[in-house]
Image (tube, rainbow, N blue to C red):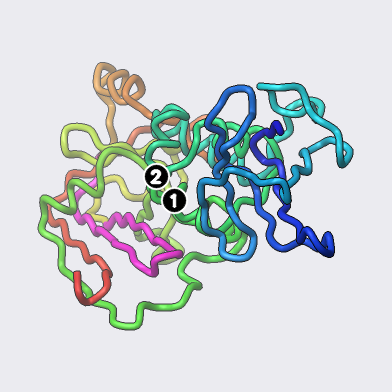
Amino acid sequence: MRAHLGDHLVIESPATGATRRDGEIVGLHHPDGTPPYDVRWSDTQEVTLLFPGPDAHIKHLGHQPGTEAGAGTPPSTGPSDPGDIGRRVATERQRRGLSREETARRARMAPGYLAYLEERPSDPSLATLFRLAAALGTSVQALRGSGIGMPPGRGTALLHPQLHDLAPQDCRTLLSTHGVGRLAVTTPEGPAVVPVNYEVLDEEITFRTTAGSVPAAAVGSEIAFEVDHLDEAMSQGWSVLAVGPARRVTAPEEVRRLTEHAHTTPWAGGEREMWVAIRPVRLTGRRITPAEQ
């Protein structure tokens, strides 16, 4: 018996031939695909080590029932075509600078299974997604992409939530080093709040924009800048509010330094060469956790 990651293992009743139990092979212990296997059972979603008996057989992914795939290599299914979950897992892993081996270790799964998830369309169990989300510091909803097009925070609140005030140093830690935040400014048309890609350098919050834009209206006034994160799966989150004066960065060497240290270009695209810097004079924040924490 030989198997590959993602193959389906079926245990049948010797008397009737009916399926008694089935599951997905999520871990191999030998490079040639011989037993034992780590199997995620469809009825409990638990993963256990299995030495298949005579009542078990394997349905190979991408093969006709009853055929054997070549030993030691995944079944051929044509060019790699990862599903949406695989793309999000790979993108988040690379964004955080993690190898597949390290991510798999954190998620308590075989590196080969993580490679399979990233490279092929798949539908991993909720337990697998929870482990991957924890390993990558994100949420199950983010990996599924279920929040696209909808505002965050649509999940159910904790049964006994607790709201904590954050110390300024905790706020600085959460704010750094870069990400997307919300800028609150006053414009000729009235107050406005807009998202911007930001960087933190030398304790200043900086972002790029264009002259005459809404974010550019922050220059020369005291503004509020907010960053938050919600874990939809765990119904937890935090927010940090920075208040301080905004200035336009004009010194060529300072502009060059900001550009060199930028982690990403503005998501909105276009030519955005005007740098604005905010030096917070007040930092406050709050975190929602279960009451017992």
Amino acid under disc 1 = Arg
- 83 or 279, which lies in front? 83
Q: Is residue 254 magenta?
A: no
- Give how far across and how far down residue 288 sits, in percent: 27, 69
Residue 160 in the image, given as x and y percentages of width and height: 29, 82
Relative image position of residue 122 (x, y in whole percent): 68, 45
Query: Would you say 175 lies left or right of 13 here?
Result: left
Q: Is residue 232 magenta?
A: yes
Q: Report which residue position mark 2 lands on.
A: 135
Q: Is residue 14 above or below residue 163?
A: above
Which quadrant of the view contains residue 81? top right
- In the picture, measured across the screen, residue 57 lies left or right of residue 274, that is right
Q: Residues within 10 Å of mark 2 (few under 14, many from 20)?
A: some
Residue 13 in sight here? yes
Q: Which residues are magenta?
A: 224-247
Q: Nearer the viewer, residue 229 or 44?
A: 44
Q: Are marks 2 and 1 in contact (CB under 8 Å)?
A: yes
Please, what is the dominant secondary structure of the magenta stretch?
strand
Q: What secondary structure is marked by label 1?
A: helix
The residue sitting at the right extreme is: 64
